[in-house]
Image: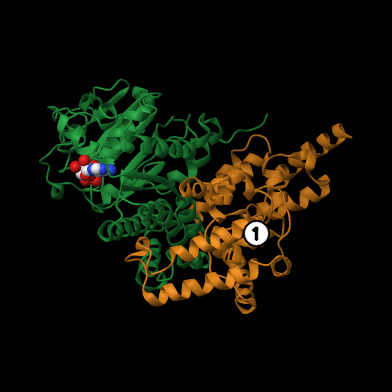
Amino acid sequence: MKQLDPVHSIRNAFHREFWRHWCVALPNWIDLDVAMPLPTIIAVGGGKGGVGKSVISANLAGKMARNSKVLAVDLDIGGANLHTYFGIKTPKLTSSDLLLGSRVDFHDISVPSGIPNLDIVCAGQDFGLDRLNSRAAGLNQIWAGILEAKTKFGYDYVVLDLGAGTASHTIDFFLGAHVGIMSVLPEPTSIENAYSFLRALLWRMIHNVGARMGEESLAHSFAERIFNGEGHGGYSQALLKLKEESPRLVNGVLAGLSGRRLGFVANQIRGQSDIEIAQSMASISKDFFGFNTLSLGYLNYDDSAWKALRNRRLLIQDFPHCLFSRRLDEVLIRLQNAVRMS
Amino acid sequence: MKFEQNSNSPEESPDSFASFDLSKVRGSYYDMLGVLPTSTSLQVREAYFRLKATYTDSNQAIYSLMTGSDLAEKIKAIEEAFDVLRDVDSRSRYNENIGITERAGASRTDILIENISFPPVDEGMRKATRQAKDQKIRLVAGQIHRDSSLALRIRSIFESAETPSGSTLKAMREAAFVTFEDIEANTKVGQEKILLIENDDFVKMPPAVYIKGFLKSILSFYGIADSKAFIEGYTLRVESCHKKTK
Ligand SMILES: Nc1ncnc2c1ncn2[C@@H]1O[C@H](COP(=O)(O)OP(=O)(O)O)[C@@H](O)[C@H]1O
Ligand SMILES: [Mg+2]
């Protein structure tokens, strides 16, 4: 009898291929069983506020719900507005109730979005971030809700709408995704914040892998060296140079880098010269940071965005043929290819 | 549309990775340009122009990432790589120099791990790398023996195997977080042989006597000394398959 590797039993080819490498960079306190079927998790981040993370999350989730069961989760704790893009009011229960330790279940806080096959979990408006620590029990519950979305509630996809900034819980949620989408605007402030976000991502990843391998202090000293000096010509090169000192830790980080995909979307494009930006940032993130990147394309600046928002309806519902919606179709196709869904 | 072309960059077609020794590519000019030994000269040229356009001051996507001198260094390295790879003759001479040869496919995850950029190397640097690699050999082997919790974990994977099979070795490799390249460097067993063994691909394997030796070095690399029963069980399977196919 041939003895089977447990990873072989995962049915979805994409998850099977990435499973081990994806797991290694998750926060250390998450202990996943190989046998548990996972939803495909897509996070939308980018470091800066107002770059279109929520518009993209909402409309992408809306498009995906045509063929699959989707859960969109607002993780912009304190600055929530994903629900507004769907034209729904903040429900009575939100993820803040989880975070504040009320006795609610993750399932209690998800509400129908108004679009078939698509539910959303809203975040509260007024929750002070300072009261949150990355191991808070409530945060744990949110993680569990996301990871068990397939087994418990049958969601095929979970879309995470992240907040701005580089708070550790934001970075961890981004690492929890199979594909992390970086939304960037063609302007220096957005680009600058995107790179800060990527630095925080790599920094956190090294620490997470180190913690998982019981090498916290070594991981910390590696990260310090990469980010303070040795990595000025590229972090991926600096990382590889450390392989001689600890092949196991560096291989672990390399595994983590290869076990998740990083897709760039250039948003609010106004001219031909802006189009290149997603491709350019994708190749820089691969070359300089070592991420497993791809360009997902671009989205035009489109007046339909605010018109739909005023109507409090989803952009793709109100203006299904507008430029934004058509470009988002192209983004979705690339995304589907990346995770080989459909 | 420019946009469509771009989406077909080499990293999007994993199949094209499968037919050469990735450890040789690492740190090479191919790596510098983000192309592969199998890339066409057109693809090399495209990659060069894309990189040149990426790493210039006027590219807004580079904003805040690098200083002026870092940028100049990068461009110099790109030019150097393209100078060699642009021409068919100098490219094939270079291939010979760094020893790129065909080999059986690696698994995609290993490809992804190896698919990470490195600066270009000249002869002196390559020598240094080779020396460093020799040092690493001892380090890697020592690493597993030193790290007792890891050694225990690997041992328990080995012991929990009901039937001697390649999947056990694969699980051990993944638990140890070593690459095929690391194992080859330590055991002198070729990467393609390791892959055949991990996949229980008996038909393509050399005779069982060789496999015996390979298994012994691989297992002792993982710190397993009492491997006799496993090795015998495994080679029996190889032999019986070879008998059947004859
Ligand atoms: N492509 C676009 N064209 C026009 N307006 C856009 C576009 N993308 C985003 N916006 C607008 O920018 C504002 C911020 O978008 P939002 O998704 O809320 O950002 P974030 O979630 O990143 O903070 C919103 O008013 C939104 O309608
Ligand atoms: Mg938002």
Q: Is residue B216 above or below residue A146?
A: below
Q: Secondary structure at mark 1?
A: helix
The answer to whether residue B31 is seen in the rendering is yes
Residue appearing at x 40%, y 31% in the figure: A39
Q: Colour of chain A?
A: green
Which chain does tag 1 point to? B
Q: Which residue is mark 1?
A: B41
Q: Which residue is the extreme one toward the top?
A: A116
- In the visual, does B229 lie left or right of A34? right
Q: Is residue A326 above or below residue B69?
A: above
Q: Which residue is the extreme one toward the left?
A: A126
The answer to whether residue A162 is seen in the rendering is no
Q: Colour of chain B?
A: orange
Nearer to me, A14 or A322? A322
- In the visual, does B186 lie left or right of A144? right
- Amino acid type for the residue under numbered disc 1: Ser
Image coordinates for residue B213, horizontal then vertical, percent: 77, 53
- Binning the other alpha carbons within 10 Å of mark 1 as few (below 14), some (14 to 19) or many (20 upward) gives some
Image coordinates for residue B24, horizontal then vertical, percent: 65, 62
- Where's the N terminus of chain A, which quadrant? top right
Nearer to me, A13 or B243? A13
Q: Is residue A119 above or below residue A283?
A: above
Residue appearing at x 60%, y 56% in the figure: B43
